[in-house]
Amino acid sequence: MVDCLTTEQRHRVMSRIRSKDTKPEMLVRRLLYAEGYRYRLHAPDLPGTPDLVFRGRHRVVFVNGCFWHSHSCSNGTHNPATNADFWAAKRTRTVERDSQALAGLAASGWAAMTVWECELRDLTAVADSLHRFLGPPAGAIK
């Protein structure tokens, strides 16, 4: 399939794709905040700059887009036909960077969880996974 946009138009579209405050990330943030969890955002002092940081718990949460981080779902395994070599190299570098960040966090004593964009179709399951990973929110009755 040929791209219907010019090179300049495609560049403008792609340059507006955000890495912070994405819709999936905002969904997870709202879910956790409503449950009583408090967190910090995008800690630059930690490997991989995690999306959500729970310093007191030594836990971090990454919210990843399936395409950009090459998840095993249908969106993540889709390979663009246009400029295929560029996209393959870019996505491979992203996966390598993700694994280095997870290894660096583990070496520093941090536990990490990744929430994938495709998993957000079932918010109840995501909430359950996050509760198991994070433990009860501060101030919760035990």
Image (cartoon, rainbow, N blue to C red):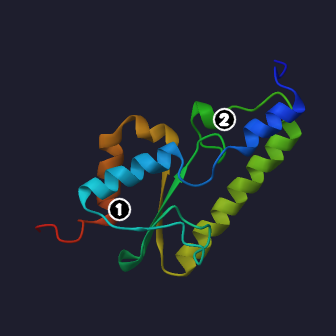
Residue type highlighted by circle 2: Thr
Residue 77 disc label: 2
74 up-or-down from 67: above or below: above
Residue 83 in sight in this render: no
Q: Is residue 57 left or right of residue 72?
A: left
Which residue is depicted at the point 59% across and 40% down? 72
Residue placed most toward the observer, 10 or 85? 10
Q: Quadrant of residue 136?
A: bottom left
Q: Quadrant of residue 38?
A: bottom left
> What x and y, as percent, mark residue 37?
30, 64
The kind of secondary structure element at disc 1 is helix
Which quarter shows the N terminus?
A: top right
> What x and y, as percent, mark residue 124?
29, 42
Residue type highlighted by circle 1: Phe
The kind of secondary structure element at disc 2 is helix
- Name the residue that disc number 1 marks: 133
Residue placed most toward the observer, 16 or 45? 16
* Residue at far bottom of view: 108
Residue 70 disc label: none
95 up-or-down from 47: above or below: above
138 up-or-down from 88: above or below: below
Which residue is depicted at the point 69% across and 31% down? 78
> What x and y, as percent, mark residue 47?
61, 72
